[in-house]
Image (cartoon, rainbow, N blue to C red):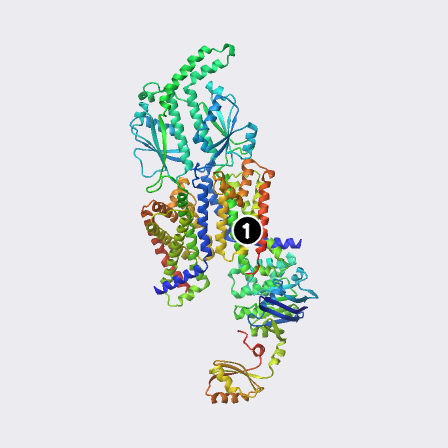
Amino acid sequence: MRRLLHVFTNDVRRHLRAPLVIVVFMAIPLAMTALIGAVFGPKPGANALPRIAVLVVDRDKSVASKLLLGAFDSARMKEMFEVTVIGESEGRERMKAGRASAMIVVPERFTLDLMEWKPVALTVVKNPAEQFLPDVAEEAVNTLAVVLSGAVRAFGDEVRGIRTMMDLPLEAFPWASLGPELAKAQSKVIAASKYLDPLLIRLKSEEVTTAGSRPAVTRADVFSAVLPGMAIMFLLFIVQTVMRDILAEREDGTLRRMMSAPLRPLELVGARILGGWLMGLAVLLVMAAAGRLLFGATWGPFGYFLLLGATAAFWVAAFFALFHALVANRNQAGAIGAPVILVFSLFGGSMMSPDAMPAAFRPIGLFTPNRWFIDGAALVRDGRFPLAAVAVLGASGLALLALAVPALLRQTRSAS
Amino acid sequence: MRRLGRVLHVARNDVWRMVRDRPFFFWTLAFPIFFIVVFGMLFKAGDAAPAVASLTVVNQDEGRWGAYFVDKIKAPNIEITVVKAEPADFTRLIVLPPDFSARIEARRDQALAFKKRAGASERAAARVETRLFQAIARVLSELVLYGDGDLTTFLDGHPEVADLVRVETRFPEKTVTAVPSGFDHSIPGTTVQFIMMMVMIYGGISVMEDRKKGVLSRLLCSPLSTGELFQAKLLGRWSMGVLQALMLFAVGKAFFGLNLGSAPLALLVLAVFALAVAALSVFAGSLLTREDLIVGVSVLLANMFAGLGGCWWPNEIVPPAVRKLAMISPAYWAMDALHALRFFQGGLRDILPHLGILLTLAVVLAVLAARTFRVRP
Amino acid sequence: MLEIRNLTKSYGDVLALDRFSLDLAKGEVLGLLGPNGAGKTTLISILAGTLGGFTGTVTFQGQSLFASRQLKNRLGIVPQDMAFYEDLSAMDNLLFWGGLYDVPRAELKRRAAEILELVELAGRAKEPVKKFSGGMKRRLNTAIGLLHKPDLLLLDEPTVGIDVQAKVSILDIIRNVGAAGTAVIFTTHQLAEVETACSRVAIMDKGRILAQGTLDELVRIVGERTFVEISGEFGAGAFSEAIQDMPAPSVELMSAGDNLALLAVSDTDQIPRVMDRLFGRKLAVTDLTIKSPNLETVFLKLTGRSLRD
């Protein structure tokens, strides 16, 4: 045990003497978290998305198109869209230059055709370079189209009656007939008001968070959600770098020299795994502290987080112990290790939320430490004990350790 | 001429050595393709939300209006699960209360609880919410039209209401003719990101190792000058970036139907971009003395530049301040130029500003790299 | 062929070369002998054109060695480092390094094949160099310097860290290259190598040449004396005291340390007298070796220290 600790402290001292690599690897998740937080974090007093630039070309210039434009004037729509009514050629130029997300073209005779219950089409010209905002604009126009269709249907008879009169010359306009039509419309409005004022069916949206969290998402919450994924990803990189000593010593001959001392192979293997584990945990705690200081990220009860972190670091150390027992040399470790980490991170939720993944990919994440750590960290953040994460990471870590230790012992003996 | 020959000779040897390295093709081709496929599927048909958004309907309604309302919500891109009681785990959920039908039939207003789980895709939630608004609008239109009498028998038979206003979508003239596929978005982003990562890592490490092993010093024992050696190193790393772009674009074209707009101009953009990255890699290789440090710094820079430059997410959702900051990233200018070519059928004139900025950046970085270029440890 | 005059180079306060001068003729193999830090590698680096910031002149075939980079076509360098690409094969390495010189491609291939024969690597020509043993790598390192048939070959400790067989092979190559007319400067701190391979030897220390000439000429510096190495149980001071009043030309103390001393004696008759003095002072002697004059004793005489210091 004394010799194990001796090797372990020497390893720690060596890594602390050249800490720049570890510092850079710790800086990466923090920098990426900062970037993701800046992009996806809530903006004060504004919509989650930037305002969507929408151009409207009004070829109709009549009642229905004005109604449509009026809809964009509501407070909620104003928050979402920045509407500019524009001439057709200029609109085309702007869209060609990609300077708006969408352009709505209201066709000629839009109002007249609606009055005649003829199907009409609004055209939404979408910015092809954008993947999201044009769709939001399209959906908004779709909803307006449904409402407008309903309104026109509801008041169709009256609208048609008035439309017929509009074709007559002014001197022949049947003013007397207008009154009854308007009266009918009025009675319909009154009748409809029982459905529309207030709306018979409304939506009451609410964002549901898990127990203990705040109702409004703050930027610190975004950082708190992103940082665990980044932290576990770079914990994998750092522990791999630290534990590459296993191969380096085999290749450089220091392993043989060590084994000529009264050091048992088990002590050496134990020191390496302990080194990876404890240095990994230390790095994780430093990243957590830096996240707290820099971004105000919350981690939940320290005891729970420490347990989760220790279990995750243990898993990672056991995994790389086995990994380094299986690969032939440092080059191979570098060539295989990094892709493995990136695949873990991609499917485990470090690079994207599992919800955003195609359904078929989601179960793959369950085989990665990233997914369990991220899920566990979310529970800890809510003040809950991450039982499943600790159990799965702990049990699978022990299984990896059980495979790694004999393999490493065999290698150590053969190298010496 | 002989001078150029020597520069080419050294550069060719660098490329040859990289290409011979077995993991090279994994990192420059196989791994990016893996990313292209995953992100291409993710961004399918220009939609960064899941292809099908899920909605759980807790239909506790004791009448018939609940099921009728659910019918109105149905859409190809929404997966509806109808349950009786609110489950513990859901992504988004709407509750139709037990008295849903009763309140409609009594013409009493009601608010339906629509719950979205925090952290789930906001885009999918927005899609579902819009669909719910449309369903409500349709039901209300029908009620306004035909809902004069007894609403308990309303569902027994009323005329179908077809929408009078349709919405057609298209892209601007002389831009794209078909909806850009997810791969059209994922291939340029992945290519740009991996050129940065691989050229910086491979290029930087090889400069550092050659210096440590005395290879750079030995090269100068030949008639090669320090300037020529620097040019050769720059050219080797640039060739590697261009080679990677060519490979990924070729694979994209052959297997994913990638449309670049003008392929020669897209390659020109990436060639100028690769020059800036090559200079950065020689700079890193001259400045740093450890392999893992070069890897760390390269990963850090490549990821930050990729994130800022629009390789990971559509730039339009990025806040204006971050968009301004993104201009320091060479990836931003490359991506913007590729967008101009791909999505707006741009020509050389449209991308000249981008090329100018990338070239300036390349020159600045090359000057920095030349000043720090060392042949001795 | 090569004239070096007053070459001076310093690193900060440390003088690496101090007005160093040397002449070298065609086909001459000069062994540059000196301990670590003597300035050998600095000299080679300056001649190779990879180190600047010096004063003095170097004339090569009638013109300044640094006048034109084209002159490097006539210069072959074998650095101390294994400076080549281990991921490439021996043949690929030769073609790459040779390609930097003005040798036509077809000629280069022919020469590469020849040189691989010469360094006995022809059978492993296509294998990645990383699979080679240390000795094979050293031979390749040497071969790269020879490929373009230089007029002047500079080798900086070309036999470091290899086994005897590989060493002999490299020394053979150096001898043969010299015999073929190439001027060679070969730095080492191995006396035996210089004795084996060189036609002329220069001993340098602290940036200067202390003596130079053929092996015989150098040995004559220490005279026709016999050297006696004495081991035993004594202190340096006690040993010096014991023989201090013995007449200097007959018995000269070259070096004295604890338990080991080196004496120069005019003839072997002096040895019993020395022993008497030691026994008289109760100094225990366990071993005594009589040596003929050689480079080691010359070096010791000139520098006052061993080559391995």
Using the image, name the chain to which the residue with label 1 belongs. Answer: B
Most extreme residue toward the front, as rendered? A45
Residue C171, percent from left and from top: 58, 70
| Residue B89 picture quarter | top left
At a point 35% along the width and 52% down the height, the residue shown is: A306
Relative to B272, A407 lies left or right? left
Say whether residue B12 is visible: no
Residue C31, percent from left and from top: 60, 72
Amino acid type at circle 1 is: Leu
Relative to C146, A208 lies left or right? left
Vertical placement of residue A151 versus C296, above or below? above
Which of these two is toward me, C227 or B254?
A: C227
Which of these two is toward me, C269 or B322?
A: B322
Residue A380, percent from left and from top: 34, 47
Relative to A394, B3 lies left or right? right
The total of numbered circles placed on residues is 1
Categorize mark 1 by other alpha carbons within 10 Å: few (<14), some (14-19), many (20+): many
At mark 1, the secondary structure is helix
Which of these two is toward me, A261 or B364?
A: B364
Vertical placement of residue B278 versus C63, above or below? above
Vertical placement of residue C218 versus B339, above or below? below
Q: Name the residue under label 1.
A: B280
